[in-house]
Image (spheres, rainbow, N blue to C red):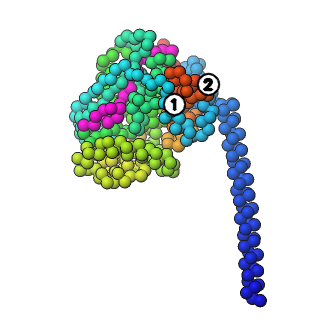
């Protein structure tokens, strides 16, 4: 009788546990359904009634006044391509190729000499080895002269002039912009077909190579106004260079898209997004494998630790930090952050982020106080666009013609900002 009573009690307990589990599953399913419906409502609302980007700027500045009165893009709603339904898909959209590839007019190969670390530069070894970078030029079809504006485009982490988002913005400025530009696409060491001649690459905070290229272009075309656009990693060292140079910067205005600003915060955020983190590591590990023979020639690199890196933090700690004479990745991130130099920027700069960016968290790195007290730096926050670089807009998404039935909103916004800067100067 005792055994049977015990068995009955266990059976009753099992039935109650199964009933509780069933209700828990029902409740969890209902909560998930509510969350899904809420997300769908928000998704449709953002697409049917999109809001203009949130602008943070000094409201009393002349630049802010000109933006409010004359901007035709930054003050209007941003319509994200509707079938790009979340941040991951929006980020991956940057890989969709153009139907008609951009054919650059000319390649300029630049051999950089060995230099010593310049004063007041925070991410640079004591001696910078020689190396090779290049500029791919795209000229407007309508003709140009020595005074035609030049826009310098700086790619992201593993980007180059033939990355699809770079080709799209290049084609826009050379072919479609109201004010046509000569386009100069910068390719750093080891990228875009450049041969790596020493075990030294580039980084999120290293500015010396880009600075020499910008000054070279300025000296070649002294009558041409210079503008610049940087993307992701490239936007950080472009913005940092502008802040480091202050009044000596030859660029007239710049746009930074998905700029890390605070590299340590960005790294910590990326660690919480393992899919994005591992995807980026695969890109840089592919680049590492190309140059492993050169990297192995320098004893300060632990090649096995570099090869075993599964996160961007581990990769930077093993390779990039020692390359730039830092003790570890955290020190490297702190001293490479463009946010340290915002206060010293002396030209108009537009910094753009998307709130749903899983790589560079716009809301985490952008602080309103940085812009409310600066007359020349403007921040633009979009709800959608993620880390696509383009911030795609339109329905068919680059499926026809030269760049399709849609546009790169970042290119439209950059063109608009440069027009506002020219109007402000009048």
Q: Looking at the image, which residue is at 45% across and 33% down? A: 231
Secondary structure beneath dot 2 equals loop
The verdict on residue 182 being magenta is yes
Part of the protein shown in magenta: 178-197
Q: Is residue 283 left or right of residue 324?
A: right
**Disc marking residue 390:** 1
Of label 1 and label 2, which has the lower sequence position? 2
| Residue that lies at the very extreme toward the bottom in this rendered image | 1
Percent position (x, y) of residue 322? Answer: 30, 48
Q: Which of marks 1 and 2 is in front?
A: 1
Q: In this view, does 92 lie to the left or right of 155?
A: right
Number of marks: 2
Q: Nearer the viewer, residue 208 or 246?
A: 208
Q: Nearer the viewer, residue 391 or 239?
A: 391
Q: Looking at the image, which residue is at 37% across and 54% down? A: 308
Query: Which residue position is annotated with label 2?
Result: 76
The verdict on residue 410 being magenta is no
Q: In this view, does 52 lie to the left or right of 302?
A: right
Answer with the quarter of the image where residue 232 lies.
top left
Q: Looking at the image, which residue is at 43% across and 31% down? A: 163
Answer with the quarter of the image where residue 340 lies.
top left
Percent position (x, y) of residue 54? Answer: 59, 32
**Quadrant position of the N terminus in the picture:** bottom right
């Amino acid at each position: 009788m005792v055994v049977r009573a015990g068995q009955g009690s266990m059976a009753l307990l099992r039935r109650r546990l199964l009933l509780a589990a069933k209700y828990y599953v029902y409740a969890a399913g209902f909560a998930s359904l509510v969350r899904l419906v809420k997300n769908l409502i928000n998704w449709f609302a953002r697409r049917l009634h999109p809001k203009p980007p949130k602008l943070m700027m000094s409201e009393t500045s002349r630049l802010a006044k000109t933006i409010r009165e004359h901007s035709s893009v930054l003050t209007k709603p941003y319509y994200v391509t509707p079938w790009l339904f979340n941040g991951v898909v929006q980020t991956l959209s940057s890989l969709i190729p153009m139907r008609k590839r951009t054919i650059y007019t000319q390649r300029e190969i630049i051999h950089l000499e060995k230099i010593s670390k310049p004063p007041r530069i925070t991410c640079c070894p004591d001696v910078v080895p020689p190396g090779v970078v290049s500029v791919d030029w795209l000229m407007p079809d309508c003709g140009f002269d020595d005074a035609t504006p030049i826009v310098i485009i700086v790619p992201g982490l593993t980007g180059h002039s033939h990355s699809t988002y770079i080709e799209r913005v290049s084609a826009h400025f050379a072919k479609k912009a109201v004010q046509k530009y000569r386009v100069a696409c910068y390719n750093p060491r080891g990228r875009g077909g450049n041969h790596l001649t020493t075990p030294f690459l580039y980084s999120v905070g290293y500015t010396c190579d880009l600075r020499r290229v910008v000054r070279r272009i300025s000296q070649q075309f002294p009558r041409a106004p210079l503008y610049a656009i940087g993307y992701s990693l490239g936007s950080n060292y472009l913005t940092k260079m502008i802040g480091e140079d202050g009044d000596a910067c030859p660029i007239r205005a710049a746009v930074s898209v998905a700029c890390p600003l605070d590299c340590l915060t960005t790294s910590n955020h990326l660690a919480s997004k393992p899919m994005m983190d591992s995807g980026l590591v695969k890109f840089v590990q592919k680049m590492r494998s190309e140059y492993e023979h050169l990297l192995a020639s320098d004893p300060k690199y632990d090649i096995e630790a570099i090869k075993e890196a599964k996160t961007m933090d581990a990769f930077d700690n093993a390779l990039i930090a020692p390359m730039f004479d830092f003790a570890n990745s955290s020190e490297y991130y702190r001293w490479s952050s463009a946010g340290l130099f915002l206060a010293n920027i002396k030209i108009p700069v537009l910094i753009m982020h998307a709130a749903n960016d899983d790589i560079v968290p716009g809301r985490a790195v952008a602080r309103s106080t940085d812009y409310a007290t600066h007359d020349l730096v403007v921040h633009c926050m979009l709800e959608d666009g993620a880390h696509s670089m383009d911030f795609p807009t339109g329905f068919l998404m680059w499926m026809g013609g030269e760049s399709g039935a849609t546009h790169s909103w970042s290119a439209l916004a950059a063109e608009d900002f440069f027009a506002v800067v020219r109007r402000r100067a009048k």
